[in-house]
Image (tube, rainbow, N blue to C red):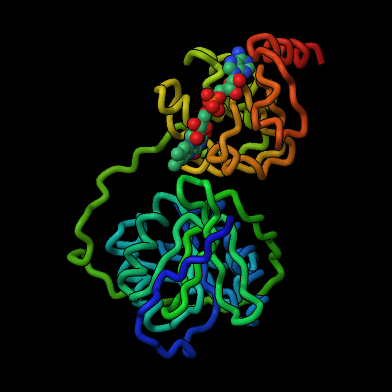
């Protein structure tokens, strides 16, 4: 069932008429726009159109003027571009200060951020600074046709219900959105828009931390959300070595290996591979679930796949309820047979 929660009941009435436009925080790393920001620009455009306002991108970094043009190509009408050596690498203090001050000056109606490590760190701090609420980890956003408020839907109570949350008395309406849930904006290099250079009032003493070294994560961590094919394993593997078999199938198909939480909790595989409510949301063309029962929290992360293939020895496993193709059998017989078959193609 759906729950409608009003996060700020009892708050004093504020004049909200000055707040307008939809903002998307465009997360960039090493001068590349993160995929979730492209998804949010697509979603933000849709919401802005429904309310009849502009879509604005907020971009922070150093020497990233080219990315501002990309934001316009992806649908932004305006880009607030804050460039400063102290913004080159993300710091909580630096980014919070710049974004909070910008929100206070420009008064957006809606602010969206990706529910990435950075977005999850930044969004609550910014929300507290500008005295508004935040709905974290949304999987759906809609505009209420009557009062044009943002309906923000996210899993709640361990993923057992979807709660729709409305920010009634504060602005902006802020949400983080899970990566991989929304469709990406399509780039149109012919679009025009306005780039506004934001004066950055930031000193070293404003930032209480210093980034000494950036340590890159392994390939799988980056690849899972981008993968076209995912071969995922669950407790049915029975042992950590089972993932080596899945790796062989994934390699044959040019894909990567995913996992259920049960296997991550058992220490069989790294959390970077986990799919689901407390893992990653993925949208591959093909998702092959091997020995995964299909708990609601797992399905929350992979039900957007184009084609779902389930291999499970229990014909009543819930995963078959959303699978396009199901194979009832022992994965240790089915997966080697698939690899064998692919080798002969
Ligand atoms: P099981 O449910 O034990 O299923 C194993 C399956 O393997 C069974 O269906 C069995 O029939 C089959 N099987 C056994 N042997 C074989 C074989 N030889 N061949 C073929 N099939 C076989 N889970 C996630 O995955 N991701 C999340 O992000 C996540 N977040 C959670 C958040 C919360 C707040 C909570 C409460 C739970 C979360 N969970 C999550 C856990 C989730 O509820 C399930 O416990 C978990 O997904 C089960 O993993 P599983 O399917 O691998 O294991």
In this orientation, does residue 65 appear? Answer: no
Vertical order, 320 against 60 (above or below): above
Q: Please identify the residue farthest to the right as the structure is shown.
A: 345
x and y percentages locating residue 275 in the rendered image: 53, 36
x and y percentages locating residue 144 in the rendered image: 62, 74
In this orientation, does residue 284 appear? Answer: yes
Residue 319: quadrant of the picture: top right
Quarter of the image with the N terminus is bottom right
x and y percentages locating residue 142 in the rendered image: 62, 67
Residue 209: quadrant of the picture: bottom left
Identify the residue at horizontal 77%, vertical 29% (top origin). Answer: 325
325 relative position to 116: left or right: right
240 relative position to 302: left or right: left
Vertical order, 153 against 21 (above or below): above
Number of numbered discs on residues: 0
x and y percentages locating residue 15 in the rendered image: 42, 90
Identify the residue at horizontal 52%, vertical 46% (top origin). Answer: 160
Residue 223: quadrant of the picture: top right
Vertical order, 343 against 278 (above or below): above
Q: Please identify the residue farthest to the front as the structure is shown.
A: 1
Vertical order, 195 against 41 (above or below): below
Say which of 32 and 4 sits in front: 4
Identify the residue at horizontal 51%, vertical 73% (top origin). Answer: 110
Quarter of the image with the C terminus is top right
């Amino acid at each position: 069932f759906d729950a409608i929660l009003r996060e700020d009941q009892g708050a004093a009435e504020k004049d909200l008429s000055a707040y307008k436009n939809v903002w998307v925080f465009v997360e960039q790393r090493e001068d590349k726009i993160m995929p979730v920001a492209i998804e949010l620009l697509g979603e933000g455009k849709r919401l802005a159109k429904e309310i009849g306002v502009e879509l604005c991108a907020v971009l922070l970094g150093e020497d990233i003027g080219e990315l501002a043009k990309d934001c316009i190509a992806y649908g932004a009408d305006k880009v607030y571009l804050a460039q400063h050596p102290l913004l080159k690498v993300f710091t909580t203090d630096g980014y919070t200060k710049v974004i909070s001050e910008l929100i206070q000056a420009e008064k957006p109606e809606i602010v969206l951020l990706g529910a990435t490590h950075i977005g999850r760190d930044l969004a609550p701090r910014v929300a507290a600074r500008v005295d508004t609420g935040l709905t974290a980890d949304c999987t759906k956003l809609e505009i209420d046709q009557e009062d044009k408020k943002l309906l923000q839907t996210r899993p709640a109570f361990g993923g057992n219900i979807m709660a729709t949350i409305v920010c009634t008395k504060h602005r902006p309406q802020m949400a983080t959105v899970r990566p991989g849930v929304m469709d990406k904006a399509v780039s149109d290099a012919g679009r025009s828009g306005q780039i506004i250079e934001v004066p950055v009032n930031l000193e070293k003493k404003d930032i209480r931390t210093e980034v000494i070294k950036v340590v890159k994560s392994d390939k799988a961590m980056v690849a899972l959300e981008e993968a076209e094919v995912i071969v995922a394993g669950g407790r049915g593997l029975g042992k950590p070595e089972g993932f080596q078999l899945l790796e062989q199938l994934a390699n044959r198909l040019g894909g990567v290996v995913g996992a259920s939480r049960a296997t991550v909790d058992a220490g069989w595989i790294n959390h970077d591979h986990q799919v689901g409510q407390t893992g990653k949301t993925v949208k591959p063309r093909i998702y092959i679930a091997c020995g995964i029962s299909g708990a609601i929290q797992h399905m929350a992360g992979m039900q957007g796949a184009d084609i779902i293939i389930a291999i499970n020895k229990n014909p009543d496993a819930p995963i078959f309820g959303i699978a396009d193709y199901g194979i009832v059998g022992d994965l240790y017989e089915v997966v080697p047979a698939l690899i064998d078959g692919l080798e002969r193609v």
